[in-house]
Image (cartoon, rainbow, N blue to C red):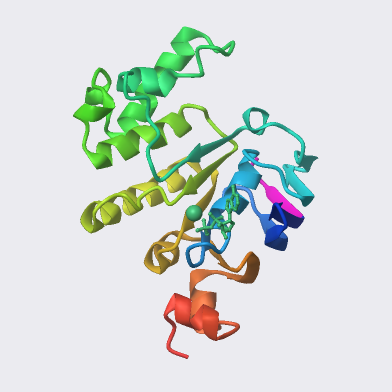
Amino acid sequence: MGRIVLKGITKSFGNAEVIHGIDLEIGEGELVVFVGPSGCGKSTLLRLIAGLDRPTSGRIEIDGEDVTRVSAADRGLAMVFQSYALYPHMTVRQNLSFGLENTRMPKSEIASRIDEAGRMLEIGDLMERRPTQLSGGQRQRVAIGRAIVRNPTAFLLDEPLSNLDAELRGTMRAELAQLHERLATTMIYVTHDQVEAMTLADRIVVLRKGMVEQVDTPLGLYNQPQNLFVAGFIGSPN
Ligand code: ADP
Ligand code: MG
């Protein structure tokens, strides 16, 4: 589960095409990082995969099924944003369960998923607090927890750590890597930070001006960048 295929994806806003025909295959359980400078189309591409926006042309498949016209809610994916987007008037527990209560999921199942996420992310003792009573790192854990309890086919993370200070970012990065090991769920992780990309990724997709420059493992990119842009961005010696 969690195989994602993009075929000839383009996206225009008005007359401006910002994604210019992207083909990509992401394997089950893979952690793929989209990296590239600000404005290159990372968030746009992620939103298209999430179903928050529709491509102008092309096709998106999840586990072999054409989901191009399927709504975000029915794609079975969970997105985590840079701004934590927690509901300020709700407790952590309510933030985690929000949306699940409207499904047919039994209350006991919801409760056990929340307990599990609480243990995994070490936010178990924060359940009755509100977001304003949490640190930045704790808020981001709750945002990730909200994705986990949905038991998604894939996690889509858009610069989830960029609001945190450098030290906490390092810690959270390691925790995300562990989480990925543990859940073995497909993750697409967007960042403009090369270090984050190099340390987290199974494969890196280097984007530039709405196009894919190169796709490879961190080591592959480092050792054999296809051009000066990739070399410069990844920081390899050649
Ligand atoms: P990144 O996430 O890599 O910084 P974005 O995907 O946010 O880049 O943006 C890619 C390009 O698309 C930018 O030129 C941006 O201005 C443009 N863009 C993104 N969203 C919209 C929108 N809703 N309307 C118009 N232009 C947009
Ligand atoms: Mg962005």
Q: Residue at x 43, y 19 (%)?
A: 97
For this view, does 160 lie left or right of residue 3? left
The answer to whether residue 30 is left or right of residue 98 is right
Q: Is residue 69 above or below residue 149?
A: below
Ligand 1 - quadrant of the structure image: bottom right
Q: What range of the chain is rendered magenta?
A: 1-7
| Left or right placement of residue 139 versus residue 60 in this view | left
Against 69, residue 149 (above or below) is: above
Q: Is residue 141 magenta?
A: no
Q: Residue at x 46, y 16 (%)?
A: 110
Relative placement, left or right, of 70 versus 78 is right
Which residue is found at the position 45% from the left and 48% from the top?
181
Establish if 52 lies above or below 226: above
Which quadrant, please, contains the N terminus? top right
Measured from the top left, where is residue 76 in percent x and y? 62, 32
Q: Quadrant of residue 116?
A: top left
- Could you tell me which residue is drawn at 48 percent across and 14 percent down? 109
Q: Where does the image place residue 129, in percent across and percent down from the top left?
A: 23, 21
In x, y percent, where is residue 31? Answer: 52, 54
